[in-house]
Image (cartoon, rainbow, N blue to C red):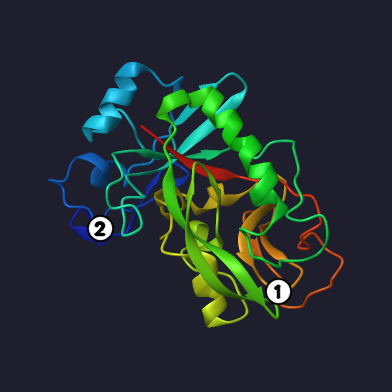
Amino acid sequence: MLTVNGKNVDYVMINNSCFKYKLDWLDKNQTGAAKQNAIYRGNNLGALTDDMSLNIKSGNFDDFCIGDYFTVGQNQYTIAGINYKIDDDNPTLNNHLVLLTSTDSQKYQMNPTATTEGGFVGSEFFKNSLPTIVDRLEKDFGDHLLSFNEKLTDKVEDGVPTHMSDYTVKACMCSSKIISGSASGSTDSGKIYNSGNDPQLPIYKLRPNLATGNANWYWLRDVTNSTDFALINPDGTIVWDDLPNHTSWYSANYKNQVRAYFLIN
């Protein structure tokens, strides 16, 4: 809580702008990832340099804030978290930034037919389209692109996810939990298998409005029934349908945009 003129407040008005206080949980003496994960800035960092890489690997991170972004050619990559993936699935992972790709003009099907059989891992997107995104990231970041473990849905029964396993990836599609802090699904068990262990990304804690797909729909990896995956709609709302076989943007064979996340150091 902030104290302004002797009063406790959780927001400050400056001219016509409202700035909401987000640092209640931050120890003022903290440094590195914990501190920088609580600061949104939005600066253009240009391309990744050797000095930047050394700063990341050192764990200092004082050159980076949430919302800052790298530009490589026509591609823009936004910092969404810092040391976010050092968890039970990745206990030995090195210091890193989590970056998000921008939604672009290319659209993808999750599957060539309206099915979620095999979950996210069983999808044609995971098998054939995600590797093309990784190829682009390898060109833009080279050896700075890291592999990491992610728990992903690989079995669906009667439209409900029933199993997940650890998979080593270099990029992954966002889940609803990563964006909003809670998982999509028609059952509690389905939500567990859709979300894995990932909490909400810091960027969406600080700026929930940034979930918007720039006037476009984009896929999430959550299985919501036997034919559909969840989506983000143009205003940034997570949308999904309990009922299969609807002719809609949710159907796995519909083409929507994608926003992937990945790690660099």
The residue lying at 72 percent from left, 52 percent from top is 124
Q: Which quadrant would the C terminus be assigned to in this image?
A: top left
Read off the residue under disc 1. Answer: 225
Where on the picture, by quarter, is residue 103? Answer: top right
Query: Amino acid type of disc 1?
Result: Asn
Against 138, residue 222 (above or below) is below
Compared across the picture, whether 238 is left or right of 165 comes to: right
Query: Amino acid type of disc 2?
Result: Asp
Read off the residue under disc 2. Answer: 24
Residue 169 in view in this figure: yes
Mark 2, secondary structure of its residue: loop
Against 180, residue 46 (above or below) is above
Q: CA distance from mark 1 to mark 2?
A: 38 Å
Q: Which mark is residue 62?
A: none
Residue 12 versus residue 226: which sits nearer the camera?
A: 226
In the rendered image, the residue lying farthest to the left is 29
Q: Residues within 10 Å of mark 1 (few under 14, many from 20)?
A: many
Mark 1, secondary structure of its residue: loop
Compared across the picture, whether 246 is left or right of 264 comes to: right
Q: Are marks 1 and 2 in contact (CB under 8 Å)?
A: no
Residue 256 in the image, given as x and y percentages of width and height: 75, 49
- Mark 1 against mark 2, which lies toward the viewer? 1
Residue 186 in the image, given as x and y percentages of width and height: 63, 79
Residue 131 in the image, given as x and y percentages of width and height: 62, 39
The residue lying at 84 percent from left, 73 percent from top is 245
Residue 236 versus residue 155: which sits nearer the camera?
A: 155
Q: Residues within 10 Å of mark 2 (few under 14, many from 20)?
A: few
Q: Reading the chain from its start, which is encountered first: label 1 or label 2?
A: 2
Residue 214 in view in this figure: no
The residue lying at 79 percent from left, 50 percent from top is 255
